[in-house]
Image (tube, rainbow, N blue to C red):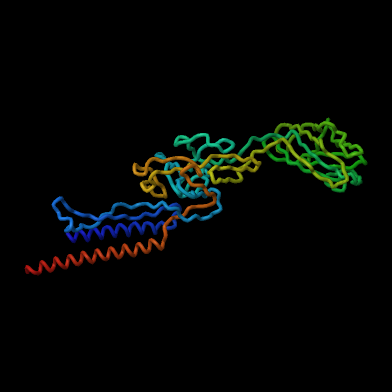
């Protein structure tokens, strides 16, 4: 029996060394959780056995217990690198025919250029809950989760039809000499440039030139690109007049230009200029207010994730769109999860079914953007454990060798 007792010790020590080796091999694996080998002694007895004379029969591996302590948090600066500070797992939908939901602590995500989904290194899509414009979740549960997708653009193009400028024209400005020439800055006093848009959302520049004519009058020349704008078919500049207090008296309505054809092509585009609020005072020329009613299609310029897991996309046209709230899962007994490889886990009867929610909800940790959770393996601790496992293996091997020597002595008695 001592042979089998020592053999069980050898097998147990070998299992422990394998577990430690696996931990050490994944010391740099993001989101990895180390395991610990637990043992139990084996006792063979019956009702008639004197309990004071029981001799054990070795050891048995009771299980490899996963340790879900938090790993080291590493700052990366990438907004799609996420870490859970506290309890919870990311939910990802695996790709392929047999796609299913898996759970992971590895929050290293990127954008799939083909689908624009936010995915991990295996191509599995990060799951989120849809939200409204204020970031409030509109669907919950496993059926409510959707892939997080980053749209390329936002908004609908709108052609500019009105530009509003609120200016102050310098009351002591000199009257320029010479005929107005937009290429000669000495022939006008000031100018303003305003970005406007055609019907396809392409940007153009409307430039207005202001020329002092007398103590109370100014001439305004307007161009889009190099094309002069006309009123009633004439390119004659619009006259703007002021009273003695510097308040504008004319024009009293917006200047309605003839429709012009954008340089990018397309239909003729109407445009008006509203100078309401413009004044003439003895202070430097300034633009007090400027606006236009056109819009362009915005291109994706950035993405952010707050502590609650709400993902917000920013676009070049100034739009911000909330795309969803990162879905998190938790389990009654995380140690009972099945390890699937690739830092994935799946639910089992021992772990219980996933409890779904979001960051900062009851039972879930907070979310950190620009951070990745590393492995929770402590190299020093594992090396010490490896030494102890090796010592146990050698001790059991010595016991086996001793039992063999005793057997040989018994065989030699007969001979």
Spot occupied by residue 248 in the image (x, y as percentages of width and height): 86, 36
| Residue in front for this viewpoint, 127 or 119 | 127
| Residue 38 appears left or right of 230 | left
Spot occupied by residue 188 in the image (x, y as percentages of width and height): 86, 45
| Residue 119 appears left or right of 407 | right
Spot occupied by residue 266 in the image (x, y as percentages of width and height): 70, 33
Q: Looking at the rendering, which quadrant does residue 290 occupy?
A: top right
Spot occupied by residue 114 in the image (x, y as percentages of width and height): 52, 42
So how many labels did they put on this image?
0
Residue at (39% x, 43% y) in the render: 332
| Residue 299 appears left or right of 221 | left
Q: Looking at the rendering, which quadrant does residue 288 occupy?
A: top right
**Residue 176 makes an appearance in the image:** no
In the figure, 132 relative to 191: above or below? above
**Residue 253 makes an appearance in the image:** yes
Q: Quadrant of the N terminus?
A: bottom left
Q: Residue furthest left?
A: 414
In the figure, 35 relative to 140: above or below? below
Q: Quadrant of the C terminus?
A: bottom left
| Residue in front for this viewpoint, 142 or 193 | 142
Residue at (59% x, 42% y) in the render: 313
| Residue in front for this viewpoint, 292 or 166 | 166
Residue at (76% x, 36% y) in the render: 163
């Amino acid at each position: 029996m001592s042979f089998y007792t020592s053999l069980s010790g050898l097998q147990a020590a070998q299992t422990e060394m394998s577990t430690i080796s696996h931990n050490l091999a994944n010391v740099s694996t993001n989101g990895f959780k180390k395991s610990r080998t637990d043992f139990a002694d084996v006792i063979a007895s019956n009702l008639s056995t004197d309990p004071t004379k029981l001799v054990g029969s070795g050891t048995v591996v009771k299980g490899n217990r996963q340790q879900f302590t938090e790993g080291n948090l590493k700052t990366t600066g990438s907004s799609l690198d996420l870490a859970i500070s506290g309890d919870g797992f990311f939910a990802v939908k695996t790709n392929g025919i047999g796609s299913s939901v898996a759970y992971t602590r590895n929050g290293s995500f990127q954008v799939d250029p083909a689908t624009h989904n936010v995915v991990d290194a295996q191509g599995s899509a990060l799951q989120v809950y849809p939200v409204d414009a204020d970031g409030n979740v509109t669907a919950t549960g496993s059926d409510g989760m959707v892939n997080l997708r980053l749209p390329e653009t936002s908004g609908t193009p709108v052609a500019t039809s009105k530009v509003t400028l609120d200016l102050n024209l310098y009351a002591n400005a000199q009257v320029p000499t010479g005929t107005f020439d937009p290429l000669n800055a000495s022939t006008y006093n000031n100018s303003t440039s305003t970005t406007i848009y055609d019907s396809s959302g392409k940007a153009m520049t409307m430039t207005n030139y202001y020329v002092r004519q007398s103590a109370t009058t100014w001439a305004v020349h307007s161009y889009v690109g190099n094309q002069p704008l006309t009123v009633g078919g004439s390119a004659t500049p619009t006259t703007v007049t002021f009273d003695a207090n510097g308040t504008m008296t004319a024009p009293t309505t917006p200047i309605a230009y003839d429709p012009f054809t954008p340089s990018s092509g397309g239909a003729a585009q109407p445009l008006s200029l509203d100078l309401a609020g413009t004044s003439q005072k003895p202070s430097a020329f300034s633009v007090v207010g400027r606006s236009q009613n056109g819009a362009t299609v915005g291109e994706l310029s950035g993405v952010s994730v707050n502590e609650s897991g709400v993902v917000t996309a920013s676009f070049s046209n100034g739009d911000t769109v909330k795309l969803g709230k990162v879905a998190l899962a938790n389990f009654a007994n995380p140690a009972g999860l099945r390890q699937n490889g690739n830092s994935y886990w799946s639910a089992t009867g021992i772990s219980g079914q996933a409890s779904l929610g979001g960051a900062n909800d009851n039972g879930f940790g907070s979310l950190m953007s620009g951070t990745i959770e590393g492995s929770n393996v402590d190299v020093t601790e594992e090396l010490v454990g490896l030494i102890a496992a090796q010592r146990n293996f050698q001790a059991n091997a010595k016991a086996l060798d001793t039992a063999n020597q005793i057997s040989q002595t018994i065989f030699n008695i007969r001979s």
